[in-house]
Structures are given as structure tokens and as C-alpha cells.
Amino acid sequence: MLYLLLKWLHVLAAIVAVGANVTYGIWIGRASRNPEVLPFTLRGIKLIDDRLANPAYGLLLITGLLMAFTAQLPLTTPWLLTALILYGIVLLVGLLGYTPALRRQIQMLDSEGFGSPNYQALARRGTILGISLAVLVVVIVFLMVVKPELWG
């Protein structure tokens, strides 16, 4: 029963984390067509990222590790180890790349405006980081669901 409860929490956290992240590009794209709402939109994304998506990603790690220990699944299992390595990369890119870029994008929008080259450069960087993170997360979800035999 413990394993099933952990699995339920794990899936719920994945829905919240990935679901929130999937919407960011849509919100930014729509708001970029109407720049006066862009500051509100970017602050809303930052709030959702900080208070909903990122905590859900933390819960994913905790529940995932607890499920592995409960099921006595070695962390060196190829699909799991690969997913954990990718998770670490996502964590680093998110914390050291995307979050600071979003914060700077908001600051630049406030100080220089939507049309400034500095804001546009930060917006492009945020887009590239966001797409990169999304691709990595999709690969992790694939590994978690399919559990392919990668080697050995």
C-alpha cells in the first residue's frame, strides 16, 4: 500500500510540475503580442514556477527515491540512473539558468521595455532554456514510463 501511495503522489507531482511548465511558452507567446500585459504574465509564471512547479519537482525526487527504496530497485538500474542524471541536469539548468534568466527578463522589461535589444536577448535565452528543459523532462518521463533496457 505504501508503494501505491508514493506512486500516486509521484504521478500527481509530475502532472503539476510538467503541466505548469508546458503552459509557460503559451503564456509568454500570447503576452508578447500584447506587451503591456507581459510584466504581469512573466511575474505570474515566476510565481507558478517558484511556488508550484519547482516544489512539485522536489516532491518528484523524494517520492521517486522512496518508491525505488520501497521496491528495492537499485539506483544503478540503467533507465533509473539515466533519469536521475537528467534530473540533476534539469535541476542545475533550471536553478542556474532559467530562474535567473526569468528574473533578469522581468527586470529588463521593467527598466528598458519590450523592444530593447537587452530584453529581446534575454527573452531568446529564456526560450532556448525553456525548450531545452522541456525536452529533457520529456525524456525523463519517457524513461519513467517505458523503463527501456538501455545497457547491460
Image: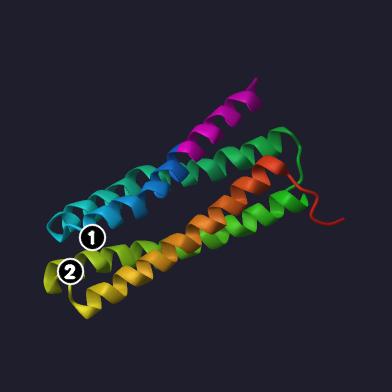
Q: Which circle's residue, 1 or 2, is located before the other in the chain? A: 1
| Residue marked by disc 2 | 114
Q: Residue at x 49, y 63 (%)?
A: 132
* Residue found at x 73% / y 50%: 79
| Farthest residue, direction front | 33
How many residues crowd mark 2 within 10 Å: few (<14), some (14–19), many (20+)?
A: many
Q: Give, as a three-letter code, the residue at label 1.
A: Ser
The residue segment tinted magenta is: 1-15
Query: Element under label 2?
Result: loop
Name the residue carrying label 1: 32
- Main secondary-structure element of the magenta-colored stretch: helix
Residue 152 at x, y = what percent?
A: 87, 55
Q: Position of residue 146 (x, y in %)?
A: 71, 42
Instruction: Tell me, yes or no, whether the two marked residues, 1 and 2, touch with CB atoms within 8 Å.
Output: yes
Element at label 1: helix
Measured along the vertical axis of the image, is residue 117 above or below residue 130? Answer: below
Q: Residue at x 14, y 70 (%)?
A: 113
Q: Position of residue 143 (x, y in %)?
A: 67, 48
Mark yes or no: residue 56 visible: yes
Closer to the camera in the image, 68 or 30: 30
| Left/right of residue 12 with respect to residue 150 in the rendered view | left
